Amino acid sequence: MTRAIRPWRSALTYLVLVVGALFFLTPFAWMISTSLKTDAQVFAIPPEWLPTPAMWSNYLRLMTEIPFLRYLGNTVFVTLTSVAFYLASSAVVAYGFSRIRWPGREALFYCLLATMVLPPQVTLIPQFVLFQKLGWVGTFLPLIVPALTGSAFAVFLLRQFYSAIPSDISDSARIDGANEWQIFSRIVLPLSRPALATASLFIFIWTWTDFLNPLIYLTDDRLYTLAIGLQQLASTRAAAWPLLMAGSLLMSLPVVVLFFFAQKTFIAGVSTAAVKG
Amino acid sequence: MAAARPRQRPGRAALTPRQRRDLWLGLAFVSPWLVGFLVFTVYPVLASLFFSFTDYNVVSAPRWIGTRNYADLFSDPLFGKTLYNTLYLALLGIPFSLLVSLLIAMLLNQRVRFQGVFRTLYFLPSVVPAVAAALLWRWFLNPDYGPVNEFLWQFGINGPGWLADPAWSKPALILAGLWGVGGSMVIYLAGLQNVPVALYEAADLDGAGSWQRFRYVTLPMLSPVILFNLIMGIITSFQAFTNIYIMTGGGPSNSTLVYALYLYQNAFQFFRMGYASAMAWVLLVITTAALALVFRTSGWVYYEARE
Amino acid sequence: MTRVRLLALTALLACHVALAQTEITFWYAWGGSEGQALQALVDEYNASQTDVVVRGSFVPIGDGERILASLAGGTPADLVTVWDWMVVPLGYGGALADLSPALTEAGVGEDDYLPGLWQYGAYAGKKYGLPTTLNVYAFTWNKDVFRAAGLDPDAPPTKVVELDALAEQLTTIDARGNLRRLGFYPNVTAIYFYVFGGQLYDPDTLEVTLDHPGNVAALEWLSAFYQKYDIAKIRRFQAGWGDMASPFNPFYRGQIAMEEGGQWEVAFTALYAPELDWGVANFPAPPGGRPDVTPVQSSFWVVPDKAPHRAEATSFLLWLTAPQQSARFAAALANIPPRRDALSAPEFAGAVTPHMQTYLDMLLTGYVFTPPGLPVGLYLSDQLNQALAAVQDGAATPRQALETAQQNVQRELQKYR
């Protein structure tokens, strides 16, 4: 729950927050401003913040320069499917790593952490060959199916949150005759809403902005995602900066909106107060 | 119901039915990951281990050379240099980032007006493409006309070359990491939600001041999340290189050439995939050692669940 | 013949044609107007015959992860665009088709290409790719700056001593002690190796010669330059430069008086600095050096060995690099076509300005050199950068730095023997 704040500290808090917010807003503001510039204005020194005239036509140009809407559709499909799969599987797996004690649990958990540690550059090629042999290259499958097996990041995150829920709750439920799946789905899961929201936010951002995996697995350019589209924009010789920023802005809007609404779940903290009392 | 006594085997305690049940249950819950690990992860990981003992340029068959890659690695001057750069950025950057993001999260956990807007604003840089952020930092930290040096000049200080100076490029990168704290901030916010109000009320009743409230209620309840951010901070700082690649390309003078960037160059630009694989496995060992150290000393983490 | 039979025959023929059409995939690396120009060529090829349909798609090259993965996986595209440093490593490793037989059969030989280009993309007697369009470097100077300093704007330095003197005269410092203008900015180290009579490798034996005396002399000259103008000041100065493709290009703004400029400056100045008065000439050389060094670089088109339709892809490639098409594509990119006959094709010749003519003359009569094509990829150029950095930081003498680089590259090359 959020705490009420003492008045004499509120002025200082607001000052810090506002100054910080301005600083943190700078890159986004620059993105917006650059998206409305002409090619020549982009690198003005010192940077111009309010381009005149504002080239709203850049956004129209963007739609024709790359097949924006088609890429958007592909990206939405891949991301929403991935998020759903990752979240569902990671929530289940994290439960096994935290709410049940079984021999070998810690060893396997460290194994899971270790998979995050090996730099992906050296597993990229063998992984591609694997998917090649499965016949999945050229489809969305290499991007989506592994999501059914959980994300190490999300499993780790959820495990930390599940571990903050007292065992009393599970124990009393077990005594009442509930089976493990019921405890998971009816008790632990609802208590973890902030964690689930956070995990899905991060998974959304990665899959939404992932460039390399779609690039190597989607051989047909009709299946390309937005991240590849942006890379195409950046690869033209005189990099079309205004278009690139316009594209990046459009691409980041869903994330911003998602965040704004997801973080409201952080406020609704039913938490463990009810049980403790 | 009486449990049948299992036959004792010498040297190994057999599992009780309860333990056996828990083992199956645990494995059942964990099975999606386990299956994925066996099907999708094991082969590429073992392949990369194999390649580390070969000369391999990806398009020809790998040629076995034993431990020569590892020997070459340890006598490569860039091995030490890149490890130093990586550790410098990690040891200074992680605490800095953890503290700043915690501070902001605490501020934004209080009931301030426009709380949602503030949180979104602090999170915004995470969605800005690395190219844009790199350009902006190059302007901010520009030695001749950037705002930071202009500010210093007001006090008569001719500011350093920042990203253009081998002695200042790493501190500049740490500063540039400021915009990235939105991610860990969000995780802290989620964690702060889990702190039961009842505990704060009890502390108030006991006459605790705000520091004591923080020290004895917030910190312990937040400790699993702090551990998470610390572990993830270590893992990502050892592996991240794209932002640095875009901002400095590893220069000037290798001062920002981090281990992961050098690894990437070897893998894709020099066609030394075998050498890069050896680099990867050395990194794995180092990171695992670091993580093991963190976990071993993580007695300060308080888990409510006794399981 | 009855009408029915005629109809049936036509239908049969149409079916036969449709069935016989082979589709080949072409990964190209250009977007925007450049990509459209290439796509126009592709469409023209498709329309001109009915056996093969070329499906082009814009695939950014990056560092080749996608290309490498597709080659490793055994299902690459039929025709791929790659950076020049990728050609020999991939080719020598067996992933690319040798184009020599097809070239011989089509009657295309060394004389069809501009001088010095035939070995570009070739290694150990095999030709693994064809250059797309050329980038050519030359010595460029800002005539307005010369005029303002009281110098003859049409008299660029031809000797290194003149260059040194002019550089000193034209370098200015501001009130804070930072550079306001740099008289001369050397960017590509390799150019000066050749200017001073050195070379990166022996073109006949393919032996790497990084520690050639000419290279050492060049690096010593560069080292003196960096010491004189203070490498720290130069780095600070560099940090403040605007983007190359913008009106804030330091050369256009007079922040650099003399530098290496490529033929793309013809198009870029027209776009971003139409008022700029600038000149192009050969690089100034020391006594005993080469007065007509012409650095050339290009991206490449390659046909993977395991391409599903190798023969068709090769035919298309030969068509694409023929003089007519080469001229059209190069004109769209503001580059120079690699084929001799393309220079006189109207699409290219019509747009040649006096500046561009200088670049062409240098290509036709000068000492052309291209980046070395070796199986080690970018490793050689990275070692050069390491040597340069060591010299700039005073960590090694030019000779030591180059000898270290030479040893490292030799050792790496041993793996490919």
Image: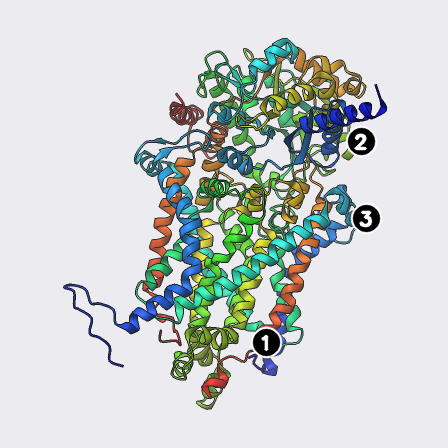
Looking at the picture, how far across and down is residue C184, in whole percent? 63, 28
Label 1 is placed on what type of residue?
A: Ile
Question: Amino acid type of disc 2?
Answer: Pro
Q: Are marks 3 and 2 on the same chain?
A: no
Which quarter shows the N terminus of chain B? Answer: bottom left
Give the Cα separation between the discs numbered 3 and 2.
25 Å
Camera-nearest residue between C338 and C189: C338
- Residue B41 position, x and y percent, is 42, 49
Q: Residue furthest right?
A: C3
Q: Relative to residue C187, is residue A210 depicted above or below?
A: below
* Mark 1 / mark 3, whichever is N-terminal: 3
To which residue does mark 1 refer? Answer: A267
**Relative height, residue B63 to residue A259 (above, below):** above
Percent of width and height locating residue C233 = 57, 38
Label 3 lies in what chain? A
Residue placed furthest toward the bottom? B205
Q: Quadrant of residue C327?
A: top right
**Alpha carbon of mark 2 to alpha carbon of mark 1: how far?**
58 Å
